[in-house]
Amino acid sequence: MFFKDCSFVNISNGTVAWLFGISGPLIIVLSSAAKGQLSETELTSWVFSIYVVGGLLSIILSMYYKQPIAVAFTIPGAIIVGSALVHHSFQHIIGAYVITGMIIVLLGLSGIISKIMTFLPMPIMMGMVSGVLLPFGIHIIEAIKEDPFIHGAIFATYLVLTFFSNSLKKFPPIIGAMLAAAILYSLFRPITIEGITFAVAVPKLFAPSFNLATIGEVVVPLLLTVIAIQNAQGIGVLKSMNFNPPVNAMTKWSGIGSIINSFFGAHSACIAGPMTGILANVKAKETAYTGAVWMGILWVVFGFSAPFAVSLTAVLPSSFILLLGGLALLGVLKNTLEQSFSSNFKMGALFSFMITISEIEFLNIGAPFWGLAFGTIVSFIMEKEDFKLMNINFRIFRKEKGYEKEGEVGWEK
C-alpha cells in the first residue's frame, strides 16, 4: 500500500521536511549541549535518540492513521534544557525528562487534551499557528536580501515552476528550487566538506536521578512546550489542511517517545508543527502520509549517523535552509491566515497572532502558549456572541451524532 500511495510530490515534501528538521532545530540542540558542557558521547546519544525515536514514531503513526504525523523534538524545550543544564546535573535533567514523559502519557490516556482542543475556538488556534509560521515566510525575504543572486534565482525558479504547475503536475516547484540551488552553489559557492566526520553513532543508556529542584524548574515548562505549543501547532496545521488528527494518540505517543528519549539523554518528543505543515501541503490528502514515512526513514538514517550528521549540518548555509523551509510552508501559512480571520473570533485570533509573533516569554514558557491563552481570554471578553454561537453549534452536532456524555465514542476516532 505504501509503495502504491507513494508519489514524487510526497517524497519531495518528506525530503524538504527532513532537511528542515536537521538544520536549525539541530543547531539549537548543539547550542544547549554546549551550555551544559556535555561530552561528545552524551551529545551523540542525544542527537541519535531525538531523530531515531522521532523517525520510528513518525513511520508508525503515519502508517497506522494514514495521516502525515511528524514526530520530532520540542525546539523551545531544548532551549529550556540548555538553561537548566548550567546549574543542574545531566542525571537530574534526565530524571525531569522521565517525569515529563509520564505526565504526557497520562494526559493522553485521560482524553483531556482532545476535549480541550474541541472547545478551543479554531480561529484562535490558527492565529497562534499563523504567528509561529510567519517568521518562516519572512525568512524567504531575508535569505534573498542576504544573497540576492543565488537565493533570488532559487526563488525565481520556484515562481516559474509554480506558474506552470498545471503542466508540471509531477514536478513540485520545491524540487526545482532545490535543483537550482545545487547547480548555483556548485558553480558559484562551492561547499567544502573538510572537517566532516564519517562515523556511526553509538548511543548510551543513562540512569535518571531525581531532584525536586530540577523537577520544579524543568517539568512544567517542558510539559507546556510539548502539549500547548508544539503539539497544538501540529494538530492545528493538520486541521487547517482538512485532516482529522488523533489528538489523544498523538499526545500519548509523544509521552512514550519522551520516556524512551530520556534514557538516551534526550529531551521530550512532540509533534512538529512546521514539518507537519510541509508534509500536509498536498492535494491528495489520502496519500500525504507517505511523505511523513519517507521523512521518518531519513531521520532514522540521520540519527544512526549522528557524528557525520552533526559535522555536515555545520557546512550547509543556514540562510539556504531557511529559504527552502519558507517556500515549503507558503501554502500552509496562507491557509492558516485565511482560517484565522475569515470567520468568527477575529479579535481573539488577532491577539493570538500578535502575542505569538512578539516572541514574549514568561515563566520559561514561550509566546505560542500565551498567544493561545490570552487570545482566548480576549475573545471571551470581547466576542461573547461568538462563544454562544459555537456552543449552540456544538450542542447541535452532538445531538445529531447521538452523543450524550463527554468522553463517549465520537470525541475521537
Image (spheres, rainbow, N blue to C red):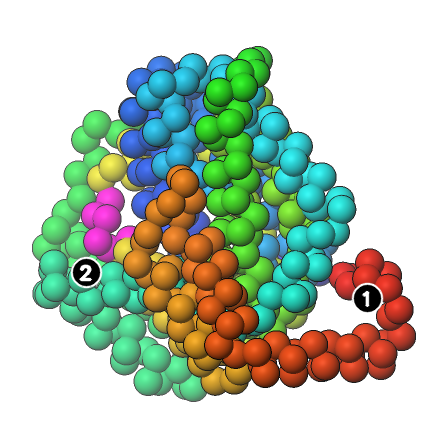
Choose top left, top right, bottom left or bottom right for residue 177: bottom left
From the viewer's side, name the closer residue of 176 and 336.
Answer: 336
Label 2, residues with CA under 10 Å away: few <14, some 14-19, many ≥20: many
Label 1, residues with CA under 10 Å away: few <14, some 14-19, many ≥20: few
Q: Name the residue at 50% across, 51% down.
A: 230
Residue depth check, mark 2 versus mark 1: number of the one nearer the observer: 1
- Where does the image place residue 181, in percent across and percent down from the top left? 23, 60
Q: Name the residue at 12% across, 58% down.
A: 146
Task: Report which residue position mark 1 lands on.
Answer: 410
Task: Report which residue position mark 2 lands on.
Answer: 143
Choose top left, top right, bottom left or bottom right for residue 388: bottom right
Extreme residue in the front direction? 381
Q: Main secondary structure of the magenta part?
A: helix
Above or below residue 49? Residue 88 is: above
Residue 377: numbered disc:
none
Check if residue 193 falls in the magenta segment.
Answer: no
